[in-house]
Image (cartoon, grey):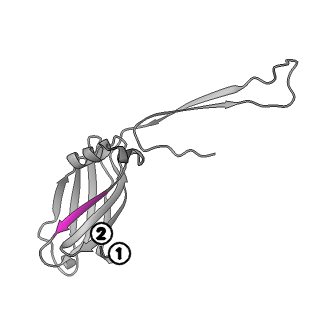
Amino acid sequence: MSLQTDTIAGVITLEVTVSGSGASSNSDVGPTPVTLTRAIRIARSAPLIRSIALGKTASGFQVQITGFSTDRDVTEADVHFNNSALGTVQTTNLTVNLTDAASQWFKTTASAQFGSQFSLLLPFTIQGSTDSIGSVSVQLKNSQGTSNTSSASFLSAAPV
């Protein structure tokens, strides 16, 4: 038997009652059921990035991030643009404030069915070609800390 827990911080309490049938003792009632209780704590933690993908658009590109945040809070995305062999990027680091957008998403009833999972789309408009960008690395932050670094390159990016 396996159990998939939710991604929201809190406590999950499991209570299982086992009762049997068959030969019983001298009692007419039968075997006594046994109840087992177990509490599982889902701790508040930094966001976790599950996947990242890049897609070219008519005016630049976009970064799509899928992840979750156990406290349903994401405050910022730190984006790093890595140079390609074809050129040099003028702006290599950018911080995107996500406090309001994340708060709005996690307050909606539509978000409840996804627990603390989210899909974030960051569009970027650029002058010139995306050929100078080899890959993009992203870290997400919340009040608990900083996520893992996740990267994607244009080699695997599909047009959007």
For the stretch drawn in magenta, the main secondary structure is strand
Residue drawn at point x = 31 percent, y = 63 percent: 64
Query: In screen coordinates, is 95 left or right of 56?
Result: left
Please identify the quadrant where the C terminus is shown. bottom left
| Residue at the extreme front | 109
Location of residue 28 by image quarter = top right
| Residue at the extreme top | 27
Q: Which residue is mark 1?
A: 156
Query: In screen coordinates, is 113 left or right of 36?
Result: left
Q: Amino acid at mark 1?
A: Ser
| 147 in relation to 11, above or below | below
Q: Which residue is mark 2?
A: 54
Magenta stretch holds residue 133: no
Location of residue 149 by image quarter = bottom left
The x and y percentages for residue 52 are: 34, 63
Instruction: Tell me the element at label 1.
Output: helix
At label 1, counting other C-alpha atoms closer than 10 Å, the crowd grade (few under 14, some 14-19, many 20 or more) is few
Residue drawn at point x = 86 percent, y = 21 percent: 25
Instruction: Tell me the element at label 2.
Output: strand
Give the Cα distance between marks 2 and 1.
Answer: 8 Å
Query: In screen coordinates, is 10 left or right of 150?
Result: right
Earlier-in-chain disc, 2 versus 1: 2
Please identify the quadrant where the N terminus is shown. top right
The x and y percentages for residue 77 are: 23, 54
Q: Which residues are magenta?
A: 120-125
